[in-house]
Image: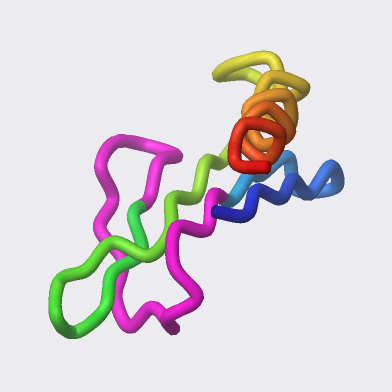
């Protein structure tokens, strides 16, 4: 899993798979799920991310996950 945040667009992306998405499903306004032709979820995009949750918590989760895998 890879997490990125674009401060300029205030969007966060959680990459769940390296596969290339071919479609997108809008779950709710500002929350999109990227999918493949096989209906696999490959990523989650959060628009206006800083208004939905504290951005630093995204990276804390990623760091904690890496540390527990080691």
Which quarter of the figure has residue 67? Answer: top right
In depth, the one of 25 and 39 nearer the eye is 39
Q: What residue lies at 37% left-to-right and 65% top-to-bottom?
A: 42
Farthest residue, direction right: 8
Q: What residue lies at 65% left-to-right and 48% top-to-bottom?
A: 3
Residue 65 located left or right of residue 38: right
Instruction: Name the image colouring.
Output: rainbow
Q: Quadrant of the N terminus?
A: bottom right
Which x, y percent locates residue 34?
36, 64
Farthest residue, direction left: 38
Check if residue 23 falls in the magenta segment: yes
Which x, y percent locates residue 48?
62, 33
Which quarter of the figure has residue 30? Answer: top left
Which quarter of the figure has residue 59? Answer: top right
Q: Quadrant of the C terminus?
A: top right
Q: Which residues are magenta?
A: 14-32
């Amino acid at each position: 899993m890879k997490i990125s945040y674009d401060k300029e667009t205030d969007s966060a992306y959680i990459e769940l798979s390296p596969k290339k998405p071919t479609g997108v499903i809008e779950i709710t306004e500002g929350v999109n799920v990227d999918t493949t032709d096989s209906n696999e979820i490959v990523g989650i995009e959060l628009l206006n991310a800083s208004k939905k949750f504290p951005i630093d918590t995204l990276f804390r989760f990623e760091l904690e996950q890496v540390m527990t895998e080691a």
